[in-house]
Amino acid sequence: MPLTWSVSRDQILHDCERRYYFQYLANAKINSRDSILREIAFLKKLKNIPGWKGDAFHSIVAGYFRRVRQGQFPTVTELVTELQDNMMNEWAFSSNKLFRTNPRAIDQDGGLALFEHEYEENPEFEVVPIIDSVAIWLYRFMAWVDDVDLVGSLARASRIWLEEPVYGPNAPGFKFSGAQVLVKVDLALQSPDGNFDIFDWKTGTPFSSNWGQFDSAEFQVNVYQLWPHLAFGHSLDSIRAHLLYVVADPVRQQNFGIDENVREQTLSFIRRSIDRVKQFAGLLGQEKLCLEDCDFALSMGKCRWCKFKRLCQRMTSDE
């Protein structure tokens, strides 16, 4: 399998080498003969509540746009009802811990394994306020869609990418420094006049800019903008990225372009990060690293919400 790189993978590697090993280097499958590999494969499927909320929002929005492209126009009320039904079914599966007896169903419709249920974190939380908060995001988002006539932009686009898989013939991305750079955009539109717009729906809190801080979301869209430039030859001035924070009221939109300086800075960062990935994969003349070669997280705060913490703690006590 070719070497792959993404912004999210780089962040995991930066936060904790052991988590990166479990997530990407261990050849773990649910049907692995080795019990530890089976456990790793199961733990990889866990989602925390913020991640679940984000996935539920992205799924309903992508489904809406797919139906629009087919000439169907569900109302906001219909979308919210569908969202609520989907999340309630997933919650029932997770809260009853059905994932323990049927882990293969986690990837199917209605299948969910929440970190909070598996680790019994915050047992007092209730599902209705969680679902209601995602419904509010959806109402805000659909109002923004109307304001900017995004449906009209889809109709006029010459080419559309909508929550495409990270692998496959239509997958966004580009090759660089011996690796395939994965680009998981929520929506990208190429207009007949050659302009290229990339959209990313954010369900986290908008970044508060302070001197010297690193905005990972802005870096991410810089990488995204390199995709049409390097893969299709689009000029930098024809590419725009749009971050949409649906947690803000009203929705907060941030627009970004990219110039030659940002292009070179971003590529330099990617190259250094890929070199580190190559080191872990044993592609720089040394052996592939094993778990014992990997450092722990830089802070204990990273460990609390890590889905591999049970396994990591047990292995550490055995060493």
Image: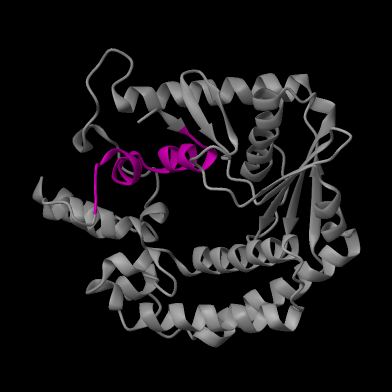
Q: Is residue 214 visible?
A: no
Regarding residue 122, the answer to whether it shows in the image is yes
| Image quarter hosting the N terminus | top left
Q: Main secondary structure of the magenta part?
A: helix
Please provide percent x and percent y for residue 26: 25, 41
Residue furthest front as drawn = 70
Is residue 99 rendered to the left or right of residue 199?
left
In which image quadrant can residue 62 be found?
Answer: bottom right
Q: Is residue 248 magenta?
A: no
Up-down relation of residue 284 to residue 290 (above or below): above
Write the residue at 87% across / 57% down. Answer: 152
Question: Is residue 221 depicted above or below 79 in this figure?
Answer: above
Q: Measuring 63% from the left and 40% from the top, which residue is drawn there?
A: 220
Q: Is residue 302 above or below residue 285?
A: below
Magenta residue span: 5-29
Q: Position of residue 40 (x, y in %)?
A: 25, 53
Residue 108 on image: x %, y %: 40, 67
